[in-house]
Image: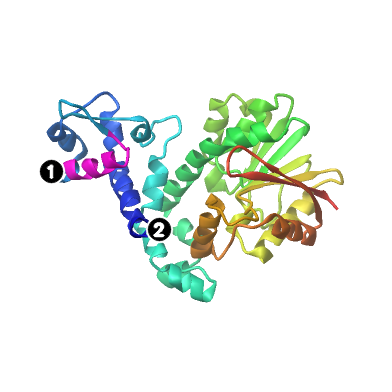
Amino acid sequence: MMEMIIASWTSQAITAAAELGVADALKDGPMPIDVLADEVGANADALHRLLRALISRGVFRRRPDGRYELNSLADTLRSDAPVSMAWAARFYGSPEQRERWTRLVDSIRTGRSVVPILHGKEGFDYFAENPEHAALFNRTMTAISALTDAAVVAGYDFSVYPTIVDIGGGQGPLLATILAAAPDSQGVLYDLPQVVASAASLLCKHNVADRARIEAGSFFDGVPGGGDAYVLKNIMHDWPDEKAVQILRNVRAAAGPGATVLLVELVIPNHDRDFPGKWADLEMLLNLAARERTAVEYRNLLSEAGFQMTRVVQTASPLSVVEARVA
């Protein structure tokens, strides 16, 4: 129990290392502590103590000659790593996120988000007025997508859909992965103007820009028509039921009679074992008064919006694909 109580110490130590850029400083090779401290702007003794603690948890390594170097876990904290966890460490360990988790008991008592209490506005409104924190969030979501997108695409056959519309797709990492695996399909990326502003470069990087169209807008106002499949990854969990149904009804209004909607979510299983979605559910409650859902809850949500759930496809990642068609 004591180990679980103080588990936040480990995560905050990882955040500190990410904030300092320790992994970036070590990417070209080992360094003695004095040189490393100068490189990252830290006190040498304090940095030694931080690394000593992290090394005991398997993050970083100290060589026999006393120099510090990266190991496989520490390498993920490089900002330029193929799948960088630096942004997630900085976002989830940020003062804003930590402060919210200290108020978890308030959310449990009320069933509401603590963000309006702390900031006087809802979660997404806070992002809109704090572009630096919003940018960190967007980079975090893009990095996390790199962990799961390949597994999602490997676990579900998207190639059967000629036109795939990614609703709320951010900068386009999932759509790029889908189109790379479905060379005969076309894609539409749809999200808010400030979110898709930098999407073109990512789509070009993945060599799919010639098959992807970018459209800007809000899924509360409507979504692009003409899609054979509408993909919504980690969108439903951002909203309480009434808002989620509103989004799905807008998809229903745009979708043709043979269209399919695909919700990519952490579907909470019917067991008492550990599962990431059970913890993400608390994060959604704290920040947005939203929730992760079970398969039954998704079936009911989709039915209310005019869809019939056909199956839930598990992937090698914690994410599942909830498939539904126009009822």
Q: Which mark is residue 206?
A: none
Q: Please state the extent of the stretch shown in magenta in the rendering.
A: 48-60
The magenta stretch spans residue 311: no
Q: Is residue 3 left or right of residue 238?
A: left
- Estimate the x, y position of residue 128 in percent, counting from the top left: 48, 57
- The residue positioned 54% from the left and 72% from the top of the image is 111
In the picture, which quadrant includes the N terminus?
A: bottom left
- Estimate the x, y position of residue 134 in percent, counting from the top left: 45, 51
Badge 2 or badge 1: first in the primary sequence: 1
Mark whose residue sits in front, 2 or 1: 1
- Estimate the x, y position of residue 59 in percent, counting from the top left: 32, 38
Q: Is residue 177 left or right of residue 256?
A: left
Quarter location, residue 156? top right
* Circle 1: residue type: Asp
Viewer-closest of 227 and 37: 37
Q: Is residue 127 left or right of residue 45?
A: right
Rounded to the nearest angstrom, the CA distance separating label 2 from label 1 is 28 Å
- The residue positioned 23% from the left and 40% from the top of the image is 51
Q: Which mark is residue 97?
A: 2
Residue 124 visible, this angle: no
Q: Is residue 232 left or right of residue 90?
A: right
Circle 2 — which element?
A: helix
Residue bearing mark 1: 45
The magenta stretch spans residue 52: yes
